Image: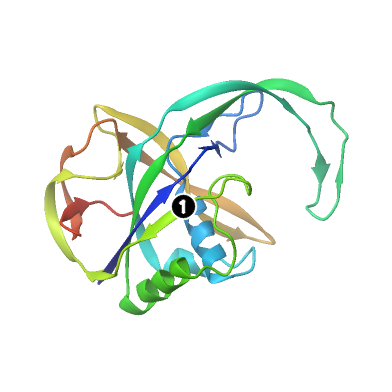
Amino acid sequence: MFGLKFRVDCPYFVTFREPTSTSLILSYVIPPYTTIRGMISNALGLPRDDLRVQDWFKIGIKPLGFEKCREMAKILKLKGTGKKYERTFPSSPMFREFLVEPSYEIFLVGDEERIKEVHSALLNPKRPLYLGGSDDLVDIEVFEPVEVEEVEAKEVWSVVEGVYEGCIVEKVPYKFVKVGRGFSVEYKTVSIPLHLPIRVTKIGFSIYGEEVMVV
């Protein structure tokens, strides 16, 4: 197995919107796994509904820092198919959560060929890279791929699947599942440590000298 680490810095602010929020625009404190895969697909130049990277690797997320804030925003409500939109609902003010200058380290674990393909794409992306909204561009530092080994970890330097004390617990989008002509979303419940490392006894991976959990 091979691993890849890259650091993502959002230089301004970003919202990872919870899709079930309506009267409030709530934000996750980490980028959902679907969002990370979407950014990688963008780097590879894949079409919008091409979901092949979902089967290429597992993902670990290490939060380096974030501050959640809230603002009052006037939201323009539109209805449409994606090709054409109509303003059928009145605009209204509502609270919107956002993160100020968040940073993360992302770990990928998978086959050597796929990991090296993603590494090359992140160094020379086909399209501009962003997380959250299309205006939320990011700075990326990409490390060299390395061989990784599975270990029994007692201290983990990443987000952990499940519920643990001293963490922010969120149910985040994990992957898209084809249902008929459309898609549904599979979610994972994860614990986001407020202070690293988090003490657990789990099977993880040793990557770049750190023990991390991948999902």
In this view, the residue in front, 21 or 113, is: 113
Q: Position of residue 69 (x, y in %)?
A: 50, 24
User: Which residue corresponds to the image point at 48% horizontal and 42% vertical from the top-left?
Assistant: 11
In this view, the residue in front, 178 or 122, is: 122
In this view, the residue in front, 69 or 184, is: 69
Residue 194, above or below 46: above
User: Which residue corresponds to the image point at 42% horizontal and 73% vertical from the top-left?
Assistant: 120
User: Which residue corresponds to the image point at 61% horizontal and 45% vertical from the top-left?
Assistant: 133
User: Which residue corresponds to the image point at 57% horizontal and 45% vertical from the top-left?
Assistant: 136
- Would residue 118 be found to the left or right of residue 42 on screen? left
Of the residues shown, which amino acid type is indicated by label 1?
Asp
Q: Position of residue 73 (x, y in %)?
A: 68, 24
- Classify mark 1: helix, strand or loop: strand
In this view, the residue in front, 21 or 186, is: 21
Q: Residues within 10 Å of mark 1 (few under 14, many from 20)?
A: few
- Would residue 80 be found to the left or right of residue 34 on screen? right
Q: Quadrant of the C terminus?
A: bottom left
